[in-house]
Amino acid sequence: MRLLWLSALACNGNAHSLLNYPGFQEWQEDFHWLYHPLLPSRYTFPEIEKGIEGVEVLIVDGTLEEGLIKNRLPYRELLLRYGDQAERIVTVGTCATFGGIFAQGGGGRSGLHFEGDEHLKGYERFWEKTVSLPGCPVQPEVLAGTLSIIRRRDPLPLDTLHRPKYFYAYTIHDGCTRNEYFEYKIDEHHFGTLEGCMFYDHGCQGTFTHGSCNKILWNGVNSKTRAGTPCLGCTEPDFPREGLWRTPKHMGIPARMPLGVPRRAYLGLAGIAKAFRIERFTRPLMEDEGG
């Protein structure tokens, strides 16, 4: 399958992420790079500007900006030319999907179809063939896996933001090793430690962020929450949010509830859970039993 990767305002994080895919060498045997900013490709970027044929999948990376020029041509011109030609369009990373970090720098910046959670109409003709892969950066398994599904032309169920459900139907909370601390409302957490939930005080957004970080571990080893750092919600339209690493509260109660949990039910469960005192949660996990 023939791929064309077009970068707008980007840090190359998504391109580097793909290079960390464990099976990259074998995986790319099924793909042909017409152009990629970091990989050997059939064409140079000036040749892409002149015009080529045969693009099957267009990969859009980075925040779009009004009037952006790539080398000599407006980025929009390239996007329209190859977007029309491609069978599928993949927005890779949160910047290309929702605007992301670069969209914080001024007006006229957005993702391909979204500015935050606002659905834009500028490229509406591409909407039905677009797949959204947010992440800062996107997990390599998510990008490589999605492209493989597209190549095989297998069914690819999408959510309302056009994220593949195979990878985004879950929340980061699903698979988190701190779930027992969350259930029993144990929030005595310190950054980098194994104990405690980070939802109550340190702004962890895992309970309302869609992604597979605790199911498909980064580098096969770890995730933010497993390492003792709160989830920052990087796959969601409102990333980056203000006030990271703190949990907004009203009268001591988190202002935002986990996805699908009514506030009244949450308060009832929290009151019951806090009544328990479980001995194994009262000491550090790595502390000697007799210490």
Image (spheres, rainbow, N blue to C red):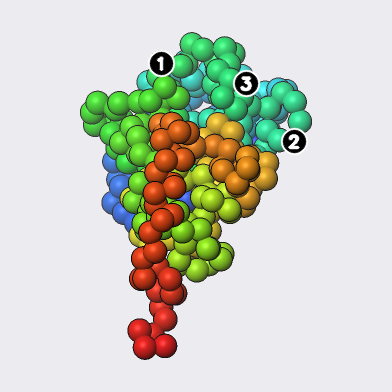
Pointers 1 and 3 in contact (C-beta within 8 Å)? no
Q: Tell me how far mark 2 sits from mark 3, CA to CA.
A: 19 Å
The amino acid pointed to by label 3 is Arg
Q: Quadrant of residue 117?
A: top right
Quadrant in which the N terminus appears: top left
Pointers 2 and 3 in contact (C-beta within 8 Å)? no
Which of 223 and 278 lies nearest the eye of the viewer? 278
Pointers 2 and 1 in contact (C-beta within 8 Å)? no
At numbered mark 3, what does the secondary structure look like: helix, strand or loop? helix
Dot 3 alpha-carbon crowd within 10 angstroms: few under 14, some 14 to 19, many 20 or more: some
214 lies left or right of 38: left
At horizontal 58% and vertical 49% (from top left) the residue drawn is: 203
Camera-side mark, 1 or 3: 1
141 lies left or right of 125: left
Q: Tell me how far mark 1 sits from mark 3, CA to CA.
A: 19 Å
The amino acid pointed to by label 2 is Gly
Which of 126 and 77 lies nearest the eye of the viewer? 126
Dot 1 alpha-carbon crowd within 10 angstroms: few under 14, some 14 to 19, many 20 or more: few
Task: Give the residue at the far bottom of this rendering.
Answer: 290
Residue 29 on image: x %, y %: 30, 45
If you read the primary sequence from the N terminus, does the residue marked by circle 1 or circle 3 appear first?
3
Residue 214 on image: x %, y %: 37, 52
Q: Which residue is mark 3?
A: 76
Residue 60 on image: x %, y %: 52, 31
Q: Which numbered disc covers residue 284?
A: none
How many callouts does the rendering have? 3
Q: Which residue is mark 2?
A: 105
At numbered mark 2, what does the secondary structure look like: helix, strand or loop? helix
Task: Look at the image and tell me whether residue 176 can be seen.
Answer: no
Q: Which residue is mark 1?
A: 128
Q: Quadrant of residue 129?
A: top left
